[in-house]
Image (tube, helix red, strand yellow):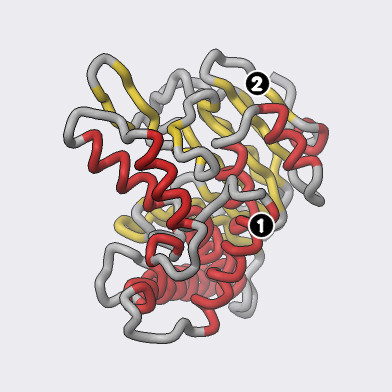
Amino acid sequence: MHSMEPLVSRHHGLLGTVIELQIWAPGSDVGEAVERVAIDEIERLQRVFNVHDPESELRRWLDGAISPSAELEAVLSLATMWRTRSAGAFDPAAGALADLWDTTASRARAPSAGEVDEVLRAMRDPTDPRSRPSTLNAIAKGWVVDRSLQQAMGVEGALGLTINAGGDLLHRGPRALLVGIEDPQRPFDNAPPLLRVRLPGGALATSGGSRRGWRIGERWYSHVIDPRSGQPVDQIASASVLAPDAATADAVATVLSVSAPAEGLAFAGGLEGIGCCIVERDGTVHRNAQWLEHELDP
């Protein structure tokens, strides 16, 4: 039964994206049970972490209405750990900088150095509300995917499951997945992938490649902001990361998307079991040895 094709299902409107499941199971009843457990867990945790929902636990905690549950506390602690480990390249409070750029761009100007410095100081002041995580999206989505797969693989008879949540992919199964990495310079559905990797198990996350940002006068500014400087960065077109779990892949990809290539490769190299592929805006591709172990020949 291991050679059978997986059951594939798609679910819209979860975690701000489309969730695709591939389920390996000895029968449709087991497959449907795996699907139900996986989606129920994603829906439950979305109610915890959705910053756009005023009734979510994250929003109510940010508003000072409640203390964090064990799950929210776990992700907050993880975000703090990555902020420390990355020397601030990952910062859950970075939304305060995006808010500043939104405000000044609406007035047709970039923020002044003084305005940026004031927000950076506030982000590092525990007594200032702007030091709190305006969003946990850079890590919570991966964490939710990890927990969903963990729960679903507890269904008796489950042989394997792949969860693809719009850039966050986690795989456990009877055979390896072949995954294409989008060419960020040709972001079209019918464009061939830049390269392909073999994923026996674990997570793959990609950051960057977005065309979002601000046009101010004649200049375009990327929406990707380095939380250390407060300035938009556009050297990196995309950063893809192979890791044991999706939360780790998420966090590392976020760090690499705001780092110079050499800095990003050094950061990934200091972590255990991390493969990375960094694509610059000019098309230059950088990969580390762990990534190359998984990459397929063209």
Q: Is residue 111 left or right of residue 122?
A: left
Q: Position of residue 133 (x, y in %)?
A: 44, 62
Asked if one can make out residue 7 in the rendered structure from this viewpoint, the answer is no
Q: Indicate which disc residue 230 carries.
A: none
Compared to residue 134, the image places residue 199 above or below, namely above
Q: Tell me the SS state at disc 2.
A: strand
| Amino acid type at image mark 1 | Thr
The location of residue 44, given as percent across then percent down, is 40, 76
Q: Is residue 74 visible?
A: yes
Q: CA distance from mark 1 to mark 2?
A: 28 Å
Residue at 63% x, 28% y: name it: 260
Q: Quadrant of the N terminus?
A: bottom right
Horizontally, residue 128 falls left or right of residue 176, namely left
Check the image and name the residue furthest to the left.
107
In terms of depth relative to the viewer, which is nearer, 64 or 210? 64
Crowd band around label 2 with a 10 angstrom C-alpha radius: few (<14), some (14–19), many (20+): some
From this view, report whether residue 162 is shown above or below residue 78.
above
Using the image as rendered, state which of residue 221 and residue 117 is in the foreground: 117
> SS at mark 1?
helix
Residue 84: which quarter of the image? bottom right
Q: Is residue 234 above or below residue 55?
A: above
Depth order, front residue of 49/185: 49
Q: Could you say which is closer to the camera, residue 33 or residue 207? A: 207
Image point (47%, 53%), residue name: 121
Quarter holding residue 115: top left
Residue for badge 2: 285
Instruction: Give the residue number, with chain letter if any, for mark 1.
Output: 84
Asked if residue 9 lies left or right of residue 294, the reply is left
